[in-house]
Amino acid sequence: MASLNTLRTKYGIVLSVGIAVVLLAFVLGDILPKMGSDNQENKNETVLKIGNKTIDQQDYYTYTQKYGVEGMAPDQNAAYIYQQILFNEYLNPAYEAAGMGFVASDEETLLHSYAENYIATTPGASAMSTADLKKEIDANWNYMKYGMYSGNFAPMVATQKAAAAYTAGKYTNKLEVEEALRNENLSFDGHYVMLPFSAIECEAATEAEIEAYYNAHRVENHNYGARTLSYVRFNIEPSAADEANAEAAIMDADLKAKEAVAANDTKAIKNAVRNVNGKIENYVALSSLSEEEVKALNAEKSYGPILNNNVWTAKYLVAKVNAPESYTFNVITTETNAEAEALVADIEAVNGNLTELEAGANATTKTVNMVDLNERGAEKLLNVKVGDIFTYVFDNQPAAVVVTELGKNADFVITANVNYAVVASPETYTEITTKADKLMKECGNTPESFTAAVQEIGMFAMPTTVVRSADPGMARPSVTGIEDSRNIAVWAYDAEVGEKKSWTSKNVAYVAMITKIDNEQYMAKNESMIKRSVENEKKFKAAKETLTMNSTDEKVKSGKFEGVTFNTEFVDGTYEPAVAAAISRIYTEGNQPVVVKGNSGVYLFVVDKINNNDAVVNADVEAKRKMMNEAVKAETTRNFNDYMMECVKVIDNRGAGEL
């Protein structure tokens, strides 16, 4: 299928910085009209709020019915529905107000661009008939429209238009281009000395210094009411009885399958494995199987059963053939089987020379691989020769075909395969979830009673911290250690100490309680980390005044570096990003030594040689400038939604009542 990347250019027009400013004013500024009404919040509980737009439970249910994807993981579905709400309720009205919304003619432009791109990039497209080419393009277009975009191109097109306006003023100047060229090509050689922090003595960090450091950096660690959630896992695993029952079923099926193999009764083989959820696969190359499988199938015509990671596996030989790896045809499709049979007669009358037939102008080349065929599908092909003419079915359409080429022969087999997972029976499931329900009822409503109840049944409660994100649209709610945990995270955000929940997910029954709330404005101090940072700063200040390139202190290490670039984070094999960054910003040789605080100690280095210093002079600056401009615009476009949401407050309470 052709890529959509080339379609962006149709909407990548430079609209003017003025329009971009208008758009930003609509989206981010105070002139964005208030969408929705205050009365909406009174209808029922608000579950999502984006700026001034509120989505209540009924609104959200409507969106889930319209945009929810069956079979998609709950967290992914929630994220997808959020994006639909964000576009429909918040972003699109602003795009339309700025004259950049989706209009009907946009789809015609997209289809025209898609067709042009498909013809230009699809191998063999130029050799296809007009009718076949149109059919192929229409099929791929419909898959893209309905399979990828749910029949709605508006979010993609409107966002691309707005992003094009936003990026209109994004460019790089000549100095930036020259610096980029220099950074790409320059590398540095030199030598250094390093005094490890462990070899430097200093006064221990005081509580006042730790507190001062924390206060200076705490804005980076804003806290939104972190909750400590303690939870117990009841793994729903098969019991000994479940395992014994599974083994008995497998062995019974194995006995019947092997008897059927010995009697060459393919129908009985298939029935035997189907009784334990087995399947009959397509042909596979014998050479693609493991050595053990090949040996067993050749000798006993069966492999297994083998139990591995609670899964029983087995293979039973249904058929073995020596056949071509592939079959290539000239194909003319028809509307009915009768038309295909009549066409075969016409082709036979001209000895397969399609150029003598009017219908031959519509012929296309198709290849069928042996490994794509099942037993029935291969029946008609196993003994064909080049030049054979017959009816066949391609893409669910009758066709007349002429065999033009056969691949080299190889051994292929069809096997009846067993992949039987041993799972907990309904009785075991009920037994385990009953234990979880019992704990839920008896654990009380305090952290102390929860801990006591868990210990009473000989289990362990695992604590984890649930932290609310500043922007739910940017970071998906989750709880570390728990899968598919968006709903439990949303519940925990506003739950009080002693509140509890129980639920089942992916063969695990959980019981959880909020056992602590940190209501400090900022995240808790990591005192050991802060202490190390404060003391390393003291050591750096002390050492940078006395460390020299000729130091004779036995604690000082020395070494050389070669080829340090702007992308290097290692110096002499050691991970030292700060030191490498300092080295890569020295543009003259033989300069004064430079002192830098590294990860492991205090470095003093000298650059002895700068390589490729004339790279900018010899470079094509204009070509580089164009490439950098495109890269800047592409990066801005990728992050466009993030830019639009920078000043918008999002409150996400979805899932709070779904557990």
Image (cartoon, rainbow, N blue to C red):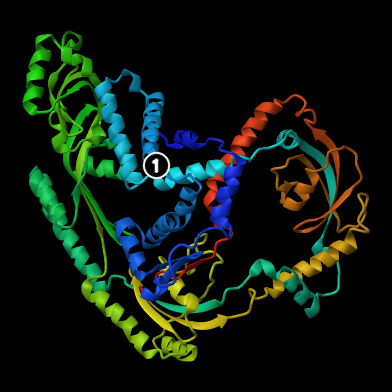
Image check: 211 left or right of 635? right
Q: Relative to residue 298, is residue 574 depicted above or below?
A: below
Q: Residues within 10 Å of mark 1 (few under 14, many from 20)?
A: few
Q: Relative to residue 119, is residue 508 depicted above or below?
A: below
Image check: 229 left or right of 622? left
Q: How many marks?
A: 1
Q: Relative to residue 158, is residue 411 depicted above or below?
A: above
The picture places residue 101, in percent across and down from the top left corner, at: 44, 46
Question: Circle 1 sits on which residue?
Answer: 103
The one of 544 and 177 positioned closer to us in this rendering: 177
Do we see residue 462 in this rendering?
A: no
For the point 55% across and 42% down, which residue is it? 165
The picture places residue 293, in percent across and down from the top left corner, at: 28, 44
The picture places residue 161, in percent across and down from the top left corner, at: 49, 42
The picture places residue 515, in percent across and down from the top left corner, at: 50, 84
The one of 180 and 22 positioned closer to us in this rendering: 22
> Label 1 is placed on what type of residue?
Val
Q: On the rendered image, what quadrant is the N terminus found in?
A: top left
Do we see residue 81 in this rendering?
A: yes
For the point 56% across and 38% down, which residue is it? 15
Image check: 121 left or right of 637? left
Q: Secondary structure at mark 1?
A: loop
Q: On the rendered image, what quadrant is the C terminus found in?
A: bottom left
The one of 267 and 432 positioned closer to us in this rendering: 432
Residue 599 is drawn in which quadrant?
Answer: bottom right
